Amino acid sequence: MSIRTLIRGGLVITAADELHADVLIEDGRVAALAAHGSAAAEAWTADRTIDASGKYVIPGGVDAHTHMELPFGGTAASDTFETGTRAAAWGGTTTIVDFAVQSMGQALRQGLDTWYDKADGKCSVDYAFHMILSDVNEGTLKEMDHLVGEGVTSFKLFMAYPGVFYSDDGQILRAMQRASGNGGLIMMHAENGIAIDVLVEQALARGETDPRHHGEVRKVLLEAEATHRAIQLARVAGSPLYVVHVSAEEAVAELAAARDKGLPVFGETCPQYLFLSTDNLEEPDFQGAKYVCSTPLRPKEHQAALWRGLRTNDLQVVSTDHCPFCFRGQKELGRGDFSKIPNGLPGVENRMDLLHQAVLDGHISRRRWIEIACASPARMFGLYPQKGTIAPGSDADIVLYDPHAEQVISAETHHMNVDYSAYEGKRITGRVDTVLSRGELVIDRREYTGRAGHGVFVPRSTCQYL
Ligand code: URP
Ligand code: ZN
Ligand code: ZN
């Protein structure tokens, strides 16, 4: 039986508009919006009315970069699809796009099926997949076409991690050529991994083993060089390009220069690069290991360029790159050798709040908050307008956000399955109050009412941002 839900009296914010409107939900979709107090809205009847007065009514967040259960460095990311999507819901994110992994020698099919199995029946919110290509060959290039056909329309390649995920320039070019034919979007981890491995070896030989050296060897210039090279390869192939986890001012400059030429080049940054810095990597007693990720955290001075890029649309998306490893037993694997610290930070629960804080701090506008966290990731990855907005016909993935609530981020209170928070003690104004996924209450006034298995796989169309 279909339940009609009415969300009444809130300020509806999308990437395009802000309006005091009531939202009618039917069969899991937005049926209509009407100005609050209008005759149309007053005439609506519903089985359930949710009072949103004093709250923002925003689209559920779309986090286009997560790694639930990712095997990495002899261990695996500590959030499962069950714990990770529950935490996402708590943080106002109602869709994740996770990275299925092709291991060396494996078919894409095998890697993707493993990810379908991991997620099936476990998720509190909806999910989709990108595919990591670790082994570009004739077979896997052909498979890319099939994946695009089944809604896995983006492919991550790595210029970093030789011997693990790394592809050489020839393989990258081939994958880009294939994507230019089948409509797939190439996502690039842009760091010169071959040069970085030399610097890692030299640093360790000098006895430089602490976490801060992770940031020092993964140089800004090696991110900028790889970003430049990826852009040129994409131009040669005639394919669009999306650069993931951009952290350095010089890499933003490469993207901006390409976009000024009118090239279809896009970039994503992550909250850790906007709010954290090499100061964190330098924390004593191996605490810096909590902040080891790649690309690495940069000196604070880079943050202004990232915020500027988000305002000028040289960067289009903020995703989390959520890839949590517990400090105890996981990050600790790299005591005495920073190169053995598993790379990645937790954050799927914190993104919407941190970006709301950025609104209050004057970095971005409210609508830009929704654009970079909901609408643009949905458009970039072929999910719009099903996801990323509140409009008739859209999935009723809706967050009631209290813009005045005060909170302090802490591992004591978060829901991610990880024993520390990268933002421990940070004060935030604003908090998720209620979350609906396809019209079902997942968080009801700060209580979890969702269930594993509610979330379903969402096939995606090709990039809608071109
Ligand atoms: O450190 C990171 N980013 N870990 C996840 C894997 C990746 O490169 O995105
Ligand atoms: Zn990466
Ligand atoms: Zn990642």
Image: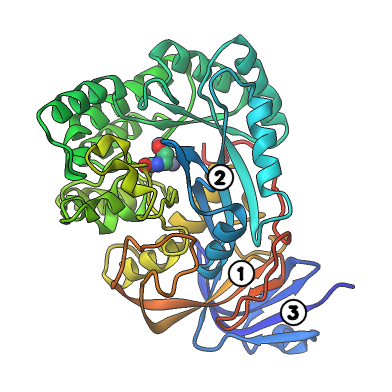
Disc 2/disc 3 C-alpha distance (Å): 30 Å
Residue closest to the eye, 409 or 30: 409
Q: Is residue 460 visible?
A: no
Residue placed most toward the observer, 105 or 331: 331
Q: Label 2, on which residue?
A: 98
Q: Front-most of 348 and 432? A: 348
Q: Secondary structure at mark 3?
A: strand
Give the amino acid at mark 2. Asp
Residue at 62% from the left image edge and 65% from the top image edge: 390
Q: Which residue is mark 3?
A: 5
Mark 1 vs mark 2, CA separation in Å: 21 Å
Mark 3 surroundings within 10 Å by alpha-carbon count, few (fewer than 14), some (14 through 19), many (20 or more): many
Horizontal relation, residue 110 to residue 71: left or right: right
Which quadrant is the N terminus positioned in? bottom right
Q: Which residue is mark 1?
A: 398
Q: Tell me the element at label 2.
A: strand
Q: Position of residue 383 (x, y in %)?
A: 62, 48
